[in-house]
């Protein structure tokens, strides 16, 4: 005998109206633009002594080529990236807590198993993405070797997106 799913109206179309989607998109563009301007402004004040090029095109790599103090750049990077990682992570994991609570209330065992399977793959991908970003950006640039930076960068820009076919299938 199959248990019935709880009768809950699907409110996605109400909550995610075109207006809400536009506001979220514009907010995302605004935050990204402000982040880029903060990093660009900090880079413009530096002078560079070494003409070597860096494999990793990233905000922390040019700091190693500067002959000036990069303390301000590192502080701005830490603050901006900290906000960009911590705020979404907290929001996502709070909502995942609500989802997990809902999954645990499903009485139908097969449905709970399927929901938990999808949920766990999502949370693993999100954890890998934010974890590798945290590992790379939320420590002093002097503590990051170029090899660690390359590995972490490739990991969160290539490996995590490659997991999407497995998550959604």
Image (spheres, rainbow, N blue to C red):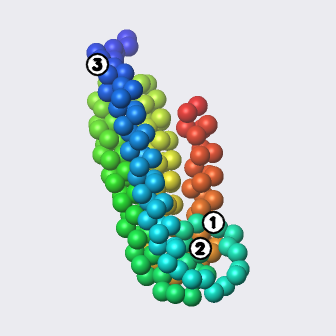
Q: Residue at x 43, y 39 (%)?
A: 25
Percent x, y for residue 148? 60, 71
Q: Residue at x 37, y 52 (%)?
A: 89
Quote the CA–CA distance across marks 3 and 2. Answer: 50 Å
Q: Quadrant of residue 13?
A: top left
Percent x, y for residue 88? 37, 50
- Mark 3, residue position: 8
The answer to the question of whether label 2 and label 1 lie on touching residues, with beta carbons closer than 8 A, is: yes
Q: Which mark is residue 57?
A: 1
Which numbered disc, 3 or 1, marks the residue that appears first in the sequence? 3
Q: Residue at x 63, y 66 (%)?
A: 57
Q: Nearer the viewer, residue 32 or 16?
A: 32
Q: Residues within 10 Å of mark 3 (few under 14, many from 20)?
A: few
Quote the CA–CA distance across marks 2 and 1. Answer: 7 Å
Is disc 2 placed on a helix, strand or loop? loop
Q: Nearer the viewer, residue 35 or 15?
A: 35
Is disc 3 placed on a helix, strand or loop? loop
């Amino acid at each position: 005998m199959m248990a019935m799913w709880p009768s809950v109206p699907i409110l996605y179309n109400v909550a995610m109206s075109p207006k809400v989607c536009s506001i979220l998109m514009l907010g995302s563009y605004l935050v990204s633009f402000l982040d880029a301007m903060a990093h660009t402004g900090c880079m413009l004040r530096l002078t560079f002594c070494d003409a070597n090029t860096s494999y990793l095109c990233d905000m922390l790599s040019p700091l190693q080529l500067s002959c000036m103090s990069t303390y301000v750049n590192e502080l701005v990077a830490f603050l901006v990236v900290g906000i960009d990682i911590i705020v979404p992570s907290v929001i996502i994991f709070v909502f995942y807590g609500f989802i997990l609570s809902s999954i645990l209330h499903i009485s139908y065992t097969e449905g709970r198993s399927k929901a938990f399977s999808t949920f766990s793959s999502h949370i693993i991908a999100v954890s890998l993405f934010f974890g590798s970003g945290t590992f790379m950006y939320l420590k002093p640039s002097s503590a990051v070797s170029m090899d660690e930076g390359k590995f972490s960068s490739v990991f969160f820009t290539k490996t995590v997106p490659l997991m999407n076919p497995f998550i959604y299938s």
